[in-house]
Image (spheres, rainbow, N blue to C red):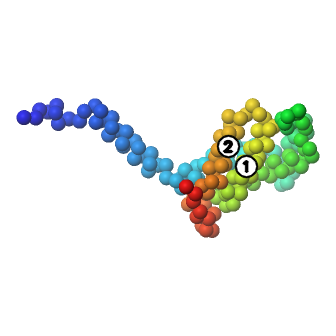
Amino acid sequence: MQTRQDSRPSFAGNVAHAIGCARRFIERLAQPSFVQLVLRIALAVPFWKSGILKWHGFLQLNDTAIDLFTDEFKLHLPGGPYPFPAPAVFAFLSACGEVGFPVLLVLGFGTRFAAAGLLLMTCIIELTVPDGWPIHITWAAMALGIAAWGPGVISIDYLLGDRAYRS
């Protein structure tokens, strides 16, 4: 004869069931297309926030942006630090990249190109601010992931035919 205690699931059975439910919920939430969109937005935000502050008007940089590349920012290379060559050009290119690449990423248009551009910018930023490597390596990992696995289904690139998926 079975008692009521025998028909109840054990503590281990309850834990296993709860873990299974949590796993299924996460699998439903973390769909690849959603994850790729979140990665694109997460990489775009810090660059956009930095880039938008460098502009005074249409194609007019703030004086502060040029001053940063002239006086503050240095390339930390062996034997250095060295000043940026052509600081006004670097300031302009940086500001353009920090605004343009995030827009492309969020739209999912030219996504792999934009990710490669932000990866290159991240490398230059790392040479300029070497103590920021914990954040920079995160940006680099996101850019590499986007470049490797593409923009995902929620993108203009997908609509235009970029459906190449690398596993």
Position in image of residue 160 (x %, y %): 63, 68
Q: Is residue 63 visible?
A: no
Residue depicted at 69% across the width and 52% down the height: 115
In the image: residue 57, left or right of residue 115: right
Q: Is residue 78 left or right of residue 148?
A: right
- Label 1 to label 2: alpha-carbon separation: 8 Å
145 to the left or right of 31: right
What residue is shown at x 67% (from left), y 57% (from top)? 111
Pointer 2: what residue?
139
Residue 22 picture quarter? top left
* Quarter of the image with the N terminus in it: top left
Q: Residue 48, how many percent across, how many down?
A: 72, 47
Q: Which residue occupies the extreme bottom position in the image? A: 160
Q: Tell me where residue 9 appears, x and y as whole percent.
A: 23, 36
Q: Is residue 152 above or below residue 23?
A: below
Which residue type carries mark 2? Trp
Instruction: Identify the residue under disc 1.
Output: 118
The reply to whether dot 1 and dot 2 touch (C-beta < 8 Å) is: yes
Q: Residues within 10 Å of mark 1 (few under 14, many from 20)?
A: many
Q: Residue furthest left?
A: 1
Q: Which mark is residue 88?
A: none
In depth, the one of 115 and 91 nearer the eye is 115
Q: Viewer-proximal residue, 106 or 166?
A: 166
Q: Is residue 137 visible?
A: yes
**SS under mark 1:** helix
Give the mark nearer the N terminus: 1 vs 2. 1
User: Image quadrant of residue 54?
Assistant: top right
Q: Secondary structure at mark 2?
A: helix
- What residue is rendered at 61% in x and 57% in y? 150
Which amino acid is tagged 1? Leu
